[in-house]
Image: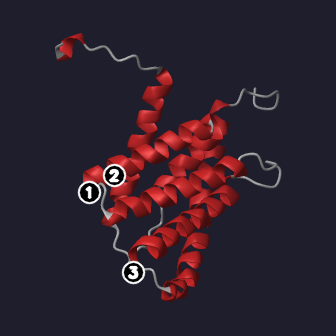
């Protein structure tokens, strides 16, 4: 069988997920170019895309975008199956699990900002668990929890606000005109 005879059955949703994963990967590349004052503390810019996809297309699409970004990013940066890959994967999986439940919270009180904060804390928890169980099995890593928790709160809030802003602007462009705007 030659390459010209292979036909892939892709859907419009597959193409959209691939585009969103590419945007998230671009943000990951941008984020890696920003120097970090503390090792392991990053703003998680790609999570903005995941939050938007979650709100617009659901958890399944958000999971695909997030996991494709983790795998493609690790291949791009040359750390596939290295400890950094497993840290990123564990953080992404824990975030996705929390988001799976958070999306069912009442939207009147919970939205992109709270979802982002929950996901950021879950991401840190997943990473700290892998660090403790695999890389540094010492109780001393607990001293790092306040630093990472503060970073999760700050970056989770900022990313949630950015995602909410994008979703708010998106609604303004896609809503039907009302009597007042005609």
Callout 2 secondary element: helix
Q: Identify whether 35 is placed above or below 4.
A: below
The x, y position of residue 147, in whole percent, is 54, 82
Q: In front of the other: label 1 or label 3?
A: 1
Callout 3 secondary element: loop
Query: Looking at the image, which is closer to me, 163 or 21?
Result: 21
- State which quadrant residue 180 falls in: top right
Characterize the local packing of mark 3: few (<14), some (14-19) or many (20 or more) Cα atoms within 10 angstroms: few
Count of marks overlaid on the render: 3
Task: Identify the mark nearer the N-term, 3 or 2.
Answer: 3
Residue 170 visible in the snapshot: no
Quickly name the residue at label 1.
Answer: 77
Q: In front of the other: label 3 or label 2?
A: 2
Q: CA distance from mark 3 to mark 2?
A: 21 Å
Quickly name the residue at label 2.
Answer: 73
Quickly name the residue at label 3.
Answer: 37
């Amino acid at each position: 069988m030659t390459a010209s005879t292979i036909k892939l059955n892709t859907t419009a949703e597959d193409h959209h997920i691939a585009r969103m994963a590419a945007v998230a990967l671009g943000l990951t590349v941008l984020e890696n170019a920003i120097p970090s004052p503390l090792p392991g503390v990053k703003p998680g810019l790609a999570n903005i895309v995941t939050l938007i996809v979650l709100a617009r297309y659901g958890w399944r699409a958000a999971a695909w975008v997030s996991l494709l970004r983790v795998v493609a990013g690790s291949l791009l940066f040359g750390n596939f199956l290295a400890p950094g890959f497993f840290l990123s994967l564990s953080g992404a999986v824990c975030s996705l699990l929390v988001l799976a439940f958070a999306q069912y919270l009442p939207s009147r009180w919970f939205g992109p900002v709270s979802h982002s904060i929950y996901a950021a804390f879950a991401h840190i928890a997943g990473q700290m668990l892998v660090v403790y169980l695999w890389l540094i099995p010492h109780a001393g890593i607990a001293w790092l929890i306040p630093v990472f928790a503060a970073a999760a709160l700050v970056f989770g809030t900022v990313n949630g606000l950015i995602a909410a802003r994008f979703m708010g602007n998106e609604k303004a462009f896609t809503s039907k005109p009302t009597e007042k705007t005609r």
